[in-house]
Amino acid sequence: MTTRFERQLEELHVQMITMGSLCEKVITLSAQAIRGKDCAKEVFEVDKEIDAKEREIETLCMRLLLHQQPVAGDLREISAALRMISDMERIGDQAADIADLSRFIDKNMDQIPDQIEKMVGMAVHMVTESVDSFVKADLDLCRKVIDDDDRVDQAFNEIKEELANQMYKNMDVKVGLDLLMAAKYMERIGDHAVNIAEWVEYSITGVHRNNEHQLGGN
């Protein structure tokens, strides 16, 4: 028979999966926005859903901490969840930033580097696997996410080089800079996925590595 604490912990897992799914959705929508689809408003709406889900999970975590008095392993898991949702909330913010940029990019879709699509796929995959690793307590999976960030960084560097070449030839400089900023936001989303994975690693091992990916306000 499951205890109340176990049921609430299961609820936490469900809510984390839900928030992760919203992050996957908002990343994909933001990429569609810069490809010309009229979905920026939907991006902003999903970002608000992510904000609301963050508050809901915070409340659940505080309830678990204050009323259930979890032991060390469970305490780490709950503490990690609180850190993870902060990064997931920032993923929503940066997807919204990309959607903002889409107003200036969508008329120049033929100039969007294919590598941005590649970055989107990698970022979504990293977010999915980082949340899955938390729910499954899968140390190998969360470490895979951390390693995968190198591929996102490489894609970003390739985009920078391609955009620099295009601006040198005939691309409008403002369009090029907007595209570069969109790619930078996508790279930051990858960094947030790494942050999430590192907190999963902490929840399992009790050790949090020094994180060069830690970001400031955004």
Image (spheres, rainbow, N blue to C red):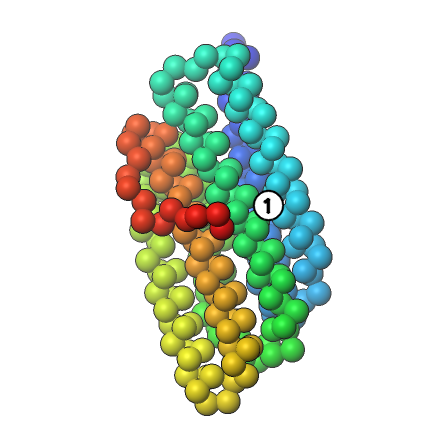
Residue 194 position in % (x across, y down): 39, 47
In the displayed structure image, the side of residue 118 where residue 142 appears, left or right = left
Residue 177 position in % (x across, y down): 50, 73
Name the residue carrying label 1.
Answer: 22
Q: Specify the farthest residue to the bottom.
A: 169
Give the camera-side residue of 64 and 20: 64
Give the camera-side residue of 93 and 33: 93
- Assess disc 1: are there few (<14), some (14-19) or many (≥20) residues with their C-alpha within 10 Å of its C-alpha: many
Q: Residue at x 44, y 48 (%)?
A: 216
Residue 204 position in % (x across, y down): 34, 29
In the displayed structure image, the side of residue 188 where residue 178 appears, left or right = right
Vertical placement of 70 versus 26: above or below?
A: above
Total numbered labels placed on residues in the image: 1
Q: Residue at x 41, y 48 (%)?
A: 215
Residue type, numbered disc 1: Leu
Q: Residue at x 32, y 58 (%)?
A: 150
Instruction: Using the rendered image of the protein, determine whether residue 194 is visible from the camera's viewpoint.
Output: no
Vertical placement of 71 versus 216: above or below?
A: above
Give the camera-side residue of 164 and 46: 164
Residue 90 position in % (x across, y down): 52, 47
Q: Residue at x 31, y 40 (%)?
A: 140
Instruction: Using the rendered image of the protein, determine whether residue 210 is visible from the camera's viewpoint.
Output: yes
Give the camera-side residue of 181 and 114: 181
In the displayed structure image, the side of residue 18 where residue 138 appears, left or right = left
Q: Secondary structure at mark 1?
A: helix
Vertical placement of 149 versus 199: above or below?
A: below
